[in-house]
């Protein structure tokens, strides 16, 4: 079996769950004897970022690697227009590389796009059509405009989209038509592909709302052996944007410290935060992330929109009782985990009260929660993920070859 991964750009620091999933999946598929082709843009190196991170090699001796050298500065767009212009240019580079190597890539059996971003999906669909093979899309996160979209059956898809953008989003006519057209194309592409969802909520939404041929999978974790003590009163957060609840964390910290001066916060992601009893580290290495996480006592992740949350699974594997917002995606995965306490989305007072509740637990109660936390994620490992992906590949090749 030969799989082509289409990865327009890749996070070299592995700071996102998507990057970690791509790396571990490719690693274990290769160990299973699957031939992996990687079509990617590598802005930091003339060699493949994926394979360099996996195998610590310079890339010359790895035949199934397709890469493009792009200088660092092209990724430094300051506005949406600049960023989209840059992305279009990178896509053009990737396309010309693909055309030059088309004869080699014609040998693949499946095209896998490991992210559901519009530009990834549209380019992957184009590649899959050029070589005449099935397209698989991993929905790390079903886009919010699909989740919030109301389908009016009598209108049809395009008119329903236009109604949403005009009457609900209150966009102007030209902008509403443009957005409706893009989303209409996107939905029709994913309906012609095969989707992998990472939680039951997204799986049901893709199948029932948009009639997509979806399969259910999950993510894994790979915890290193880090043996050191932990501080019960150290609260850790990992995230870098509003979707992950960063603004709520920045509001919560002064609320907590005004009542409890013995609590310490560790923030991984934001780098320029100045509160007392708070250390903000920005982007850190994988080892430092695990070291900081496993030496903390409580994990907090007030995500408004999420899919699987590898960071939550990693925190639980360290034995950290966790506080999250009650959102359907995470509820469908972690709903039976007693070490997770959920609060209403956006309710900072409830978030603070729940944190104080965990801080006030007795040593025996806290130790019991730590034990339950580790048990919640025993099933999440990358070997099982790779086995599941192989099952999906084989089923697709059997039914749709």
Image (cartoon, rainbow, N blue to C red):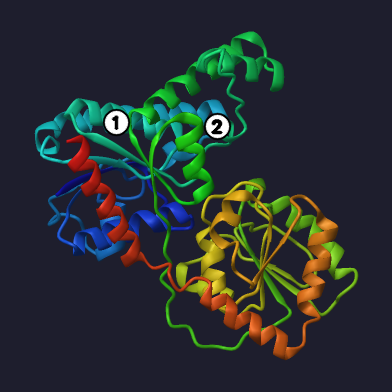
58 lies left or right of 380: left
Asked if residue 401 can be seen in this view, the reply is: yes
156 lies left or right of 270: left
Classed neighbour count for the residue bearing mark 2: other residues with Cα under 10 Å, few (<14), some (14–19), many (≥20): some
Quadrant including the C terminus? top left
Residue 274 locus on image (x, y percent): 76, 62
Residue 7 locus on image (x, y percent): 33, 43
Q: Secondary structure at mark 1?
A: helix
Disc 1/disc 2 C-alpha distance (Å): 29 Å
Front residue (pair 338, 286): 338
Give the total of numbered labels: 2
Quadrant for residue 258, please give it. Answer: bottom right
Residue 46 locus on image (x, y percent): 26, 48
Q: Which residue is mark 2?
A: 146
Front residue (pair 27, 201): 201
Residue 267 locus on image (x, y percent): 65, 64
Residue at the right extreme of this rendering: 259
Identity of the residue drawn at 47% across and 67% down: 285
Q: Which residue is mark 1?
A: 93
| Label 1 vs 2, first from the N-terminus | 1
Identity of the residue drawn at 43% across and 83% down: 225
Residue at the top extreme of this rendering: 173
285 lies left or right of 268: left
Position of residue 147 relative to residue 64, above or below, is above
Identity of the residue drawn at 56% across and 55% down: 332
């Amino acid at each position: 079996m030969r799989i082509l991964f289409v990865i327009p750009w890749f996070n070299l620091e592995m700071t996102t769950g998507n990057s970690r999933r791509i790396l571990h999946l490719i690693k274990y598929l290769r160990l299973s004897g699957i031939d992996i082709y990687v079509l990617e843009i590598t802005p930091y190196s003339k060699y493949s970022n994926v394979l360099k991170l996996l195998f610590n090699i310079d890339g010359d001796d790895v035949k199934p690697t397709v890469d493009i050298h792009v200088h660092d500065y092209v990724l430094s767009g300051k506005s949406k227009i600049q960023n989209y212009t840059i992305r279009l240019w990178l896509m053009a580079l990737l396309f010309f590389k693909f055309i030059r190597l088309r004869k080699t890539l014609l040998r693949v059996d499946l095209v896998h796009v490991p992210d559901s971003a519009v530009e990834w999906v549209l380019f992957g669909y184009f590649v899959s059509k050029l070589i005449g093979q099935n397209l698989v899309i991993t929905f790390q996160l079903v886009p919010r405009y699909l989740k919030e979209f109301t389908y009016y059956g009598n209108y049809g898809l395009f008119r329903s989209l236009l109604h949403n953008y005009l009457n609900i989003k209150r966009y102007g006519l030209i902008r509403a038509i443009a957005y409706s057209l893009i989303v209409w194309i996107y939905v029709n592409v994913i309906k012609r592909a095969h989707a992998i969802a990472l939680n039951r909520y997204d799986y049901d939404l893709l199948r029932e709302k948009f009639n997509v041929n979806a399969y259910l999978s999950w993510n894994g974790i790979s915890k290193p052996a880090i043996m050191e003590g932990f501080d019960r009163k150290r609260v850790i957060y990992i995230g870098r944007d509003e979707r992950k609840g960063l603004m709520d964390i920045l509001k919560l910290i002064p609320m907590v410290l005004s009542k409890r001066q013995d609590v310490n916060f560790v923030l991984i992601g934001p780098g320029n935060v100045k509160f007392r009893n708070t250390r903000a580290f920005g982007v850190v290495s994988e080892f430092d992330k695990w070291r900081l996480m496993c030496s903390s006592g409580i994990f907090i992740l007030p995500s408004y929109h999420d899919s699987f949350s590898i960071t939550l699974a990693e925190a639980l594997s360290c034995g950290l009782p966790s506080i999250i917002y009650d959102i359907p995606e995470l509820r469908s995965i972690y709903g039976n985990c007693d070490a997770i306490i959920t609060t209403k989305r956006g309710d900072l007072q409830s978030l603070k009260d729940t944190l104080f509740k965990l801080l006030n637990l007795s040593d025996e109660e806290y130790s019991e929660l730590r034990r339950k936390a580790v048990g919640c994620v025993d099933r999440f490992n990358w070997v099982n993920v790779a086995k599941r992906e192989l099952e999906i590949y084989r089923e697709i090749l059997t039914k749709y070859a």
